[in-house]
Image: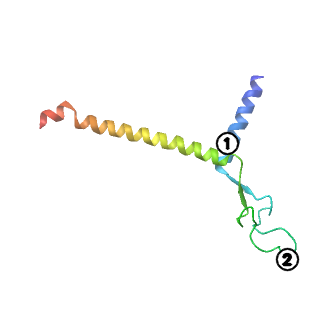
Amino acid sequence: MINLLLLAMAALALWAVSVYVYPFRPCRRCSGTGRKPGSNRRRFGPCPRCGGTGRAQRLGSRTAHRTVLSVRSELAKERQRKRDRKATDRATHPRRLEDR
């Protein structure tokens, strides 16, 4: 039972990494060509679903990117707070005040 749970967690982690690294898939309507599939008269022009790019966003890719961005921004904010605390400590250190 525990092996199955570990296997499921590993599969979920691999899926999350793949969604982050490869956020797009080929468009299902045009099969990645970016052109309208249809009759001769309507064959030309960009695909209405993907806008002519031939790509569509994978399920969960926005969530994965937003999560990584929020974690990175929180870490950056914490680093900045630490720098600010160090600068304040240096400016108000007793030795520095005696030298003045």
Measured as percent of width and height from the top left, residue 61 is found at 66, 48
Q: Which mark is residue 16?
A: 1
- How crowded pointer 2 is (Cα within 10 Å; few <14, some 14-19, many 20+) is rated as few
Q: Is residue 68 above or below residue 34?
A: above
Find out whether the residues at labels 1 and 2 contact each other: C-beta distance under 8 Å: no
Residue type at the position of mark 1: Ala
Q: Is residue 97 left or right of residue 41?
A: left
Identity of the residue drawn at 73% across and 55% down: 25
Q: In which image quadrant can residue 56 be found?
A: bottom right
Residue 95 left/right relative to 43: left
Q: Quadrant of the N terminus?
A: top right
Tell me the amino acid under the disc marked 2: Arg
**Residue 86 at x, y percent in the picture:** 31, 36
Question: Which of the two residues, 35 or 17, is positioned nearer the viewer here?
Answer: 35
Which percent across, then down, holds residue 33?
Answer: 77, 66
Callout in the foreground (1, 2)? 2
Q: Residue at x 76, y 26 (%)?
A: 3
Element type at mark 2 = loop
Which residue carries the number 2 mark?
41
Q: Residue furthest top?
A: 1
Distance between the alpha carbons at the discs numbered 1 and 2: 42 Å
Label whose residue precedes the other's in the sequence (1 or 2):
1
**Scheme of colours in the image:** rainbow
> Farthest residue toward the right?
39
Quarter of the image where one finds residue 92: top left
* Residue at the image position 74 percent from the left and 31 percent from the top: 7
